[in-house]
Amino acid sequence: MRHVVVDTFSWKIFLGDWIPVILPWKEYYIISVGDIFVYIGVFLFLLKIKKRDR
């Protein structure tokens, strides 16, 4: 299903929205806002673990 008529707002729909990413060397990706939040969370988690090791 590619297009859906949405009559009420939901955060699940916003976080699952598709964003096409086309890199200059002809690689194509599809990401979502939710994916970006997950990547940021993992990055911050790894930074926190790294600080604890010192």
Image (cartoon, rainbow, N blue to C red):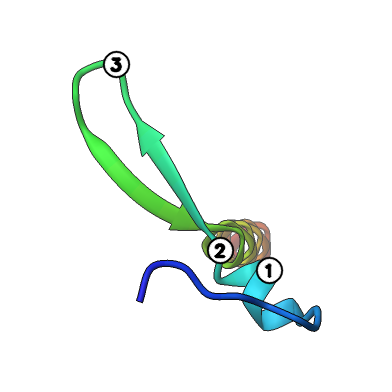
Identified at 32% across, 25% down, the residue is 23
Location of residue 1 in the rendering, given as x and y in whole percent from the top left corner:
35, 77
User: Label 3: which residue?
Assistant: 24
Among the 4 quarters of the image, the one containing residue 49? bottom right
Q: Amino acid at mark 3?
A: Pro
Q: Quadrant of the C terminus?
A: bottom right
Describe residue 42's horizontal placement relative to residue 28 as left or right.
right
Location of residue 36 in the rendering, given as x and y in whole percent from the top left corner:
57, 56
User: Label 2: which residue?
Assistant: 17
- Residues packed near mark 1 inside 10 Å, few (<14), some (14 to 19) or many (20 plus): few
Identified at 40% across, 37% down, the residue is 21
Label 2, secondary structure: give it.
loop
- Residues packed near mark 3 inside 10 Å, few (<14), some (14 to 19) or many (20 plus): few
Location of residue 14 in the rendering, given as x and y in whole percent from the top left corner:
68, 68
User: Label 1: which residue?
Assistant: 14
Q: Are marks 2 and 1 in contact (CB under 8 Å)?
A: yes
Identified at 59% across, 67% down, the residue is 34
Kindly report which numbered mark, 1 or 3, lies closer to the viewer in this rendering: 1
